[in-house]
Image: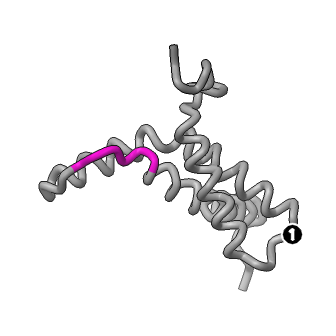
Amino acid sequence: MSDLGGWEHVFGIKSVHLCAGFAGGIVRALINSHYTLAARISAAVVGGLTAGYGTPPAAQIVRRWLDLWGYPIGELEGSVGFLLGLVGMTVCEAVMRWARRWRDGLPER
């Protein structure tokens, strides 16, 4: 029997990653005082989804990088998930700006 009562995975995402990213998104939303309520909620959701899907590959990269330096490795997926949640909305905003710039083309001189 699991500790989470069957909630280890939600929509194919480990719930630990989802929660860590959600917490990172909440912190980002609280740091930015100009965010509306809708923007704060979406920052938390995007942070959770970014961490949920990005933590497994990112944790592998971080683990290998730390191995190169001989750094002792413990459980780092929660930390990686939190950091991905913290930067998730920033990455999404940057992708949206890039997509708009690509759609509209470069400004003419």
Let me know if residue 76 is in the magenta part. Answer: yes
Q: Which residue sits furthest left?
A: 70
Region of the chain picked out in magenta, as a range = 73-78
Q: Quadrant of the C terminus?
A: bottom right
- The residue lying at 12 percent from left, 55 percent from top is 70
Label 1 amino acid?
A: Thr
Judge the density around disc 1: few (<14), some (14-19), many (≥20) Cα neighbours within 10 Å.
few
| Residue 105 pos. (x, y %) | 72, 66
Q: Quadrant of residue 85?
A: bottom right
Does 29 sit above or below residue 17?
A: below
Q: Is residue 64 above or below residue 9?
A: below
Q: Position of residue 98 (x, y in %)?
A: 66, 63
| Any part of residue 1 in sight | yes
Going 58% across and 31% down the picture, which residue do you hit? Answer: 13
Residue at image point 41% right, 46% down:
58
Q: Quarter of the image holding residue 29?
A: bottom right
Question: What is the secondary structure assignment of the residue under circle 1?
Answer: loop
The image quarter in which residue 10 lies? top right
Q: How many marks?
A: 1
The prevailing secondary structure element of the residues shown in magenta is loop
Q: Is residue 58 left or right of residue 104?
A: left
Residue 102 within the segment the image draws in magenta: no
Residue at which label 1 appears:
36
Q: From what the image shows, is residue 109 above or below residue 101?
A: below
